[in-house]
Amino acid sequence: RVDCHPQPGASREVCEAKGCVWCSTTVANVPWCFYPADGPHGYTVKDVPQKTAQGWRVTLIKRGSISLFGNDISPIVMDVEFHTKDRLRFKIYDPNNKRFEVPLNIESSSNVSFEPNYDVEFINDTALQFRVIRKKTRTVLWETTLGGLIFSNQYIQLMTSVPSTSIYGFGEHEHPSFKHDMNYVRYGMFSRDQSPVVMLQALSNLYGVHPFYMCIEKDFNAHGVLLLNSNAQDVTLSPSPSLTFRTIGGILDFYMFLGPTPENVIQQYTEAIGRPFMPPYWSLGFQLSRWGYNSIDVLEKTVERLRQYDIPHDVQYGDIDYMERQLDFTYDKANFAGLPEYIKKLKNDGMHYVIILDPFLTKDEPQGTYRPYELGQELGIWINNSDGITPAVGKAWPPGDSVYPDYTNPKTAEWWIQMCMEFKNILDYDGIWIDMNEPSNFQNGQQPGCEENHLNYPPYVPGKYISFY
Ligand SMILES: *[C@@H]1O[C@H](CO)[C@@H](O)[C@H](O)[C@H]1NC(C)=O
Ligand SMILES: *[C@@H]1O[C@H](CO)[C@@H](O)[C@H](O)[C@H]1NC(C)=O
Ligand SMILES: *[C@@H]1O[C@H](CO)[C@@H](O)[C@H](O)[C@H]1NC(C)=O
């Protein structure tokens, strides 16, 4: 059963009006409203798939007149690109209107004369069928035969069967084991400042988003799949076994990595999205951090106690209490008087020092007193409202209200580097701990409240419905 009414408020009437099947069950988590085997949903192919330089292109036309979330897009195009012998891309998009795409350019191999480790197949049944097959074992890695593809303005959905129930990934969520429970578990994906609440088994979405999974096939070959989409989204794992992807914006842009070992999958994945940075050797050492030393005296005594008891200690941290009134790029000259000299002393002893910085800045300090805000304001680097010019305002640690630097703006990088360099002349830190960059806001929405529009109140809100604030 693939859920045909993923939002609250399902009933037989609503369900049947959508062309779906209503059948109650006492089994927990199993949807009561689900897509029929051959319902009036999905897309059908318009022409036979066309060969392109890199693979195939197929144009899809929506079937039927039922619209589950309004503003369905038709025709849509599916491009299949053979990127490397182990990497396949398939992308479904609106050919007539540009929609948001994550600005990450994953290059295809310039050498087109490779022999791929996968086959693709299109089947023109009543609805689209698309398969990816591992050549060597004929295992079907991906098969969209489970029901309706939906491609509407604010609701995009695709289902696929997967070759086993050994599915890993889809960070970051709270869940009890690395191998996922496939019993109709739904994970919302939207980064937020939420710490795990173990007792509730809330499956909550946490600080980061990695729309990537790895599947271990029954013969222990492994493959991975990335959905390159940064809109709010969720994924449902069901026991058939299958996956249902839902996103409320952008396009569907999948990358599959053929492995065949888990290590190969990760190598191929990071070859595509970028390798992690090489951490400095010292950062692999013993580190101590806490919120609430509150004074340099307590900090010094803590460091001394570690030495007294021979506890290894390579790196010391300063949490927000080192700052003056929790203002980035300042330190508390009363309670942490002498911090610059103390950091030098720690470094002379072979240690390293990491400071915290929070990616929001108060806009309410008296004029002429807080350069980080004023320079940012001059450069126009804050995240703006939909009018394009008014900064979005929230509330976080520092006094007053906060604005949020837009880290996709190149000018923000200039500003950030400048501020970090100036501050390093004051506190000679070795590393920066960037916290709360989800970004975090202590208020529900922004000030003075969110405008009532289709973007702030979308027809479908991804997630689990029990774990939102
Ligand atoms: C695909 O199938 C549909 C219905 O089964 C049919 O109307 C259509 O002509 C077929 N398209 C192609 C390209 O074969
Ligand atoms: C392209 O790939 C093929 C197959 O792997 C290889 O034999 C050939 O040398 C490659 N050509 C270039 C120019 O790298
Ligand atoms: C945001 O608004 C400021 C003016 O407040 C403007 O200078 C800046 O260019 C805007 N940012 C973007 C990305 O448009």
Image (cartoon, helix red, strand yellow):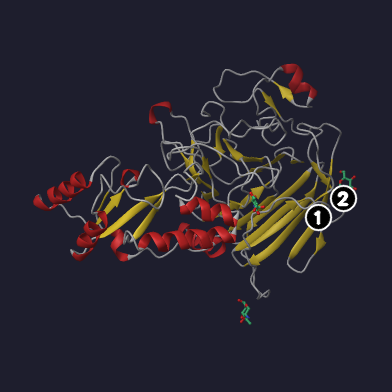
Assess mark 2: CB under 8 A from ligand 1?
yes
Residue 262 lies, with reference to residue 237, above or below; the image says below
Which residue type does callout 2 highlight?
A: Lys
**Residue 243 in the image, given as x and y percentages of width and height:** 61, 41
Which sits in the foreground, 158 or 292?
292
Q: Residue at x 67, y 47 (%)?
A: 389
**Residue 78 in the image, given as x and y percentages of width and height:** 76, 53
Q: Is residue 408 visible?
A: no
Residue wearing tag 2: 46
Residue 101 is left or right of residue 375, and the answer is right
**Residue 290 in the image, given as x and y percentages of width and height:** 28, 43
Badge 2 marks a residue whose secondary structure is loop
Q: Which mark is residue 159?
A: none
Q: Give the class, few, some or many, for how many residues have Cα within 10 Å of label 1's Cα (few <14, many ≥20).
A: some
Residue wearing tag 1: 58
Q: Give the class, few, some or many, for how many residues have Cα within 10 Å of label 2's Cα (few <14, many ≥20).
A: some
The disc, 2 or 1, on the residue closer to the chain's N-terminal end is: 2
**Residue 64 in the image, given as x and y percentages of width and height:** 86, 35
Which sits in the foreground, 74 or 359?
359
Which sits in the foreground, 443 or 457?
443
Residue 94 is left or right of residue 208, and the answer is right
Q: Residue at x 50, y 39 (%)?
A: 192
Residue 147 is left or right of residue 304, and the answer is right
Q: Is residue 444 visible?
A: yes
Marks 2 and 1 sit apart, C-alpha to C-alpha, by 8 Å
Q: Residue at x 57, y 39 (%)?
A: 393
Q: Residue furthest left?
A: 308
Which sits in the foreground, 62 or 420?
420
Residue 450 is left or right of residue 434, and the answer is right
Q: Residue at x 23, y 54 (%)?
A: 338
CB atoms at circles 2 and 1 under 8 Å apart? Answer: yes
Residue 53 lies, with reference to residue 216, above or below; the image says below
